[in-house]
Image (spheres, rainbow, N blue to C red):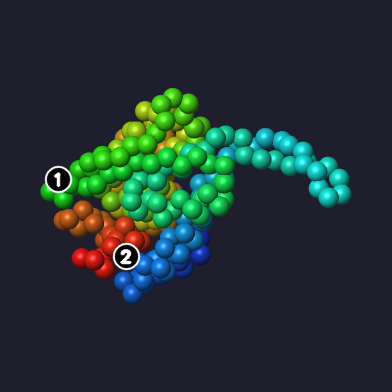
C-alpha cells in the first residue's frame, strides 16, 4: 500500500516485544516507547530537505548541511505525549502543537476536546504522533485538522496499527505517509487492536493503578 511503511528493523522488533508484554511496568513502558519513537522518527525523516551551510571548527571552516523546512510535532493527547521528547532530542528546533480526542465507547467515534494550532503560518512538515492506530477515527480527525491548518506534508507515526485503521487513513488521506512498528491482526468488538498492547495511555501514565 502506497505511503504505508511498516518498520522491520531488528531493534524495532526487539523493543516492541517488550512494549507488548503485560509484565512491563509503566517506567519501562515509557523508556521503550521513547526508543521506538526515535527509530520511527529516523525512518520518517530520511527525505527531509537540507540546505548548505558553513561552520567553523576549532581548526578551520567546514561545509555542512542542516534541515531546511519548519517541522511541527503534533501529538494526539494523551498517549502521543510519550513520543514527543525523543523526537525533540533529534529535532530540537521543531515546534510542538497539540490535539486532544477521546473515543465515544458506544459509537467508537472521536470527540475533540482540545486543539492548539496557531492561526495561519503553518509549518511545512508535520509529524502527527499517536502510539495506537486502531479504528483510525482519531487519526483521521487529527489529519483533517493539520491539513486544514495548511500543512502540505504530513507524516503519521504510530507504534501499532490495525488493518482497519490503516485502510481508513489511506482511503481518506492517501498522500499521508504512515510509519508503524507493526500492523497487527484486527480490531476486536470493542475497537481494541489484537494482539496489540492494551491501552497505551493507561500503561504510559500508570493510570490503571487508580482504577
Say which residue label 1 marks: 107
Find disc 2 in the rendering and name its residue: 206
Q: From the viewer's perspective, is the residue at label 2 or at label 1 nearer?
A: 2
**Residue under the point 70% across and 40% down:** 65
Compared across the picture, whether 47 is left or right of 127 comes to right
Residue drawn at (23%, 42%) of the image? 110
x then y, percent, for residue 24: 37, 72
Label 2 and label 1: CA atoms lie apart by 26 Å
Quick one: which residue is furthest to the top in this view?
A: 120
User: Visible in this render: residue 168?
Assistant: no
Q: Position of residue 184 (x, y in %)?
A: 32, 58
Q: Quadrant of the C terminus?
A: bottom left
Left or right, 43 with respect to 63, comes to left
Relative vertical location of residue 133 with respect to residue 16 in this rendering, above or below: above
Q: What crowding class fits label 2: few (fewer than 14 Cα within 10 Å), some (14-19), or many (20 or more)?
A: some
140 vs 97, nearest the viewer: 97
Left or right, residue 192 beside residue 17: left
Mark 1 falls on what kind of element? loop
Q: Position of residue 204 (x, y in %)?
A: 35, 61
Neighbor class of circle 1 (other Cα within 10 Å; few <14, some 14-19, many 20+) is: few
Amino acid at each position: 500500500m502506497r505511503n504505508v511503511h511498516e518498520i522491520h528493523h531488528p531493534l524495532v522488533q526487539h523493543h516492541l516485544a517488550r512494549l507488548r508484554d503485560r509484565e512491563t511496568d509503566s517506567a519501562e513502558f515509557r523508556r521503550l516507547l521513547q526508543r521506538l519513537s526515535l527509530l520511527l522518527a529516523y525512518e520518517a525523516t530520511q527525505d527531509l530537505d537540507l540546505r548548505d551551510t558553513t561552520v567553523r571548527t576549532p581548526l578551520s571552516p567546514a561545509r555542512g548541511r542542516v534541515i531546511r523546512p519548519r517541522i511541527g510535532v503534533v501529538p494526539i493527547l494523551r498517549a502521543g505525549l510519550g513520543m514527543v521528547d525523543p523526537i525533540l532530542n533529534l529535532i530540537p528546533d521543531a515546534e510542538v502543537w497539540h490535539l486532544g480526542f477521546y473515543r465515544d465507547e458506544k459509537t467508537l467515534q472521536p470527540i475533540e476536546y482540545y486543539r492548539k494550532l496557531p492561526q495561519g503560518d503553518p509549518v511545512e512538515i508535520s509529524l502527527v504522533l499517536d502510539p495506537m492506530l486502531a479504528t483510525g477515527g482519531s487519526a483521521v480527525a487529527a489529519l483533517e485538522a493539520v491539513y486544514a491548518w495548511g500543512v502540505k506534508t504530513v507524516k503519521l507515526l504510530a507504534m501499532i496499527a490495525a488493518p482497519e485503521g490503516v485502510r481508513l487513513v489511506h482511503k481518506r488521506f492517501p498522500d499521508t505517509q504512515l510509519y508503524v512498528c507493526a500492523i497487527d491482526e484486527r480490531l476486536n468488538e470493542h475497537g481494541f487492536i489484537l494482539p496489540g498492547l492494551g491501552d497505551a495511555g493507561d500503561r504510559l501514565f500508570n493510570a490503571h493503578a487508580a482504577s
